[in-house]
Image: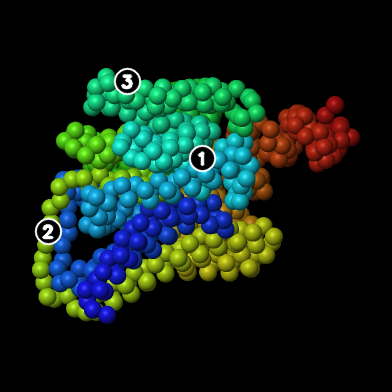
Amino acid sequence: MTAEKLRTYIDKLLHLSLYMILFIIPLSFWLPANESFETPKTVNFYVLLAFASALFIARQALSGRFFIKTTSFSLPVLGITTVVFLSFLKGIYLNSHAFPMHWQFFKFILANAVMYFLMINVFSKKDIPKLLYFILASHFIVTTYGLLQYLGVDFIKWVSFGEGRVYSTMGNPDYMATQFSILIPVMIALIISPISRINKLLVTIYLCFMFILIIVSHGRGAWVGFLGSLIYMFILFGAAYGRDFFSRNRAFAVGLASFVVLLAIIFSFPNPLNKNSQTILDRLKSGYSLTNNSVAVRLFYWESALQMAMKNPLLGAGIGGFSLNTSYFQRKVLDRWEKVAPLMAEQIEPHVELYTHNDYLQTLAETGFAGLGAYLWLFAAILIMSFRNAFAENNPLLKNILFGISGAIVAFLLNSLLNFPWRVAPTLILLWSLFAVFSLSETKTTHEAVSDKFKSWVPALALLLAVIFSAAQVNSLLANTCIRSGQADFMNKNYDSARVTFERALNANPRGTDIIELVLYSGNAYNALGNTPKSVEYYNRGLLMFPNFIESHYNVANVYMNSNMTDKAVEEYNKVLDLNPKFTSAINNLANIYFNRSEFDKAVEMYQRALKIKPEGVEARYNLGAAYFRMKKYKEAYEELSTVLKYDPNYTLAKDWIAKMKAAGLVR
């Protein structure tokens, strides 16, 4: 085979790899994965991107030229990537044991930047329609499956988000709706462009289908992005084409608006077409009440993110570090709310949470003001540039596509106010793909170095490294599936089998978020097997990586308590309560330790604390009655035991003790 023919084959494979990223990622799901519908998507993304990168290097090596093409938009791309890298280093500096967690999130941003540069170096302006074809074709399949799901035809049958809320291959209704809200402005731009009638009809049909799925998703963030981008697009086209635009496209504009209004009406009251358990109006009303649980929880996350940012203003707590620190800062928010907003404080409880449900605040918390500045620069740049370039573009199709991309960015930015699309794998890949499509419309600058230093082994080495990297990503997916199978073994009391499964997963290059789960579950398995030293070892391994992991502190405390190491148990339970003062199980166990030590005053204080949080807790109330009895406060003991029977009339122990107290004449 001649060198020229080899380069031709490599070039075709390179194009195919990038097209496959656009087409396959939204469709990827693997049922056995442990509530991690994004893992198969990221694994496919990394594998295809690794081979595309290797093929690109091979193509350059065979030509003896190394070059990289950039555009004006490449500068903010480099800016956000650089700041995220610095934040990654900051996270490792704060806690080197948390490296896997920070690496997981930094690697994904870096990979998207690599994809962006590959696309603008491999494709040209004439390839824009073809790239959009692969993006839309894939999402038309996602849409079709979503409609089937809504109609009851579902092959996944995996997670339920409430009656009528569908998610297709995205695994989550909000993720699916966000994808569609980003694509709809581009589709509208295509419909008003000079494309074939059959393509216009196809795009219009799927546009209507996406409207339906966005509404039944009941994702408020997606609704905001969807409606905001529609308004933006109408204003934009009016400004670009004048009043006659609406007269020329009257049928489309009126039809589009009428269809949206019709859908809003249909899904605003119970009827055979509306399969949602909640109407649109109910969903909107719940979003305006500050004492509503979902609203209070989001505000809780937002304030904890702000407090985290204030503690780490320059580069934040490290990319991916929100979950590692959130429970610590949530406790501070809870203390403040209990004083100034007690009704809202009743709705929340400090816990581990991956997402802030506001990308601006989470970016600020994780990467500091430098990161938020780079983030806003990135989006301001593409909004301004796409708007400016569209007005300068003479080709009507490309002109409208650029307008559509600007509308997609508006949808993304509005959605980011209430959700976290920057941290959702398929959505972020879609976004960076649109970044690349936009940059293909820009003027490129080539940075080239001609060299004869490339050897024949460079392509082979690049492909070998791609294979090794890909194998590691596949192992990550296998490690993730082990979580679910190990949990099944544990639930069936096959503790040794669960232990083997969890430990095998830990040796298989798991993601940072999976490592945290796996060390916890491994500790649980060893604890169930009665191996106290190994269970404590695993729990403490998790705490090194995640010092504010409430559940690990609680499990360590339980192991110490069951091993009669009560001093250490008290220390760990207090760490739990330092993070989450509402953790009633920890309060009860701590009270039981004091009870068994005959420190009844402390025990009573803890039982009362637990009952203040959860008055219906019959176990804590029974124990409180027992503590009063041991203190010879028989009246108080009788009152508490009687209250137990009000909550649970069949609580035998309470009945027996009341009978004994009456028989002994201690109470009347």
**Could you say which disc has been placed on residue 447 in the image?**
2
Please state which amino acid type lies under the numbered disc 1. Pro
Estimate the spatial distance between the alpha carbons at disc 2 and disc 3, rounded to whole Å: 47 Å
Q: Position of residue 331 (x, y in %)?
A: 45, 37
* Element class at badge 1: helix
Please state which amino acid type lies under the numbered disc 2. His
Instruction: Using the image, determine if residue 27 lies above or below residue 403.
Output: below
Query: Mark 2 vs mark 3: which is more N-terminal?
Result: 3
Q: CB under 8 Å between callouts 3 and 1?
A: no
Q: CB under 8 Å between callouts 1 and 2?
A: no
Residue located 35% across and 56% down the image: 19
* Element class at badge 3: helix
**Category of crowding for the residue at label 3, using alpha-carbon neighbours closer than 10 angstroms: few (below 14), some (14–19), many (at least 20):** few
Residue located 43% across and 37% down the image: 201
Query: Mark 1 vs mark 2: which is more N-terminal?
Result: 1
Q: Position of residue 636 (x, y in %)?
A: 73, 30
Estimate the spatial distance between the alpha carbons at disc 1 and disc 2, rounded to whole Å: 43 Å
Residue located 33% across and 74% down the image: 464
- In the image, 9 versus 450, the foreground residue is 9
Using the rendered image of the protein, determine whether residue 358 is visible from the camera's viewpoint: no
Instruction: Using the image, determine if residue 481 lies above or below residue 382.
Output: below
- In the image, 480 versus 261, the foreground residue is 261
Query: Mark 3 vs mark 1: which is more N-terminal?
Result: 1
Q: Is residue 372 left or right of residue 163?
A: left
Q: Is residue 394 left or right of residue 586?
A: left
Question: Disc 3 designates what residue?
Answer: 247
- In the image, 407 versus 225, the foreground residue is 407
Question: Disc 1 designates what residue?
Answer: 173
Please state which amino acid type lies under the numbered disc 3. Ser
Residue located 14% across and 68% down the image: 65
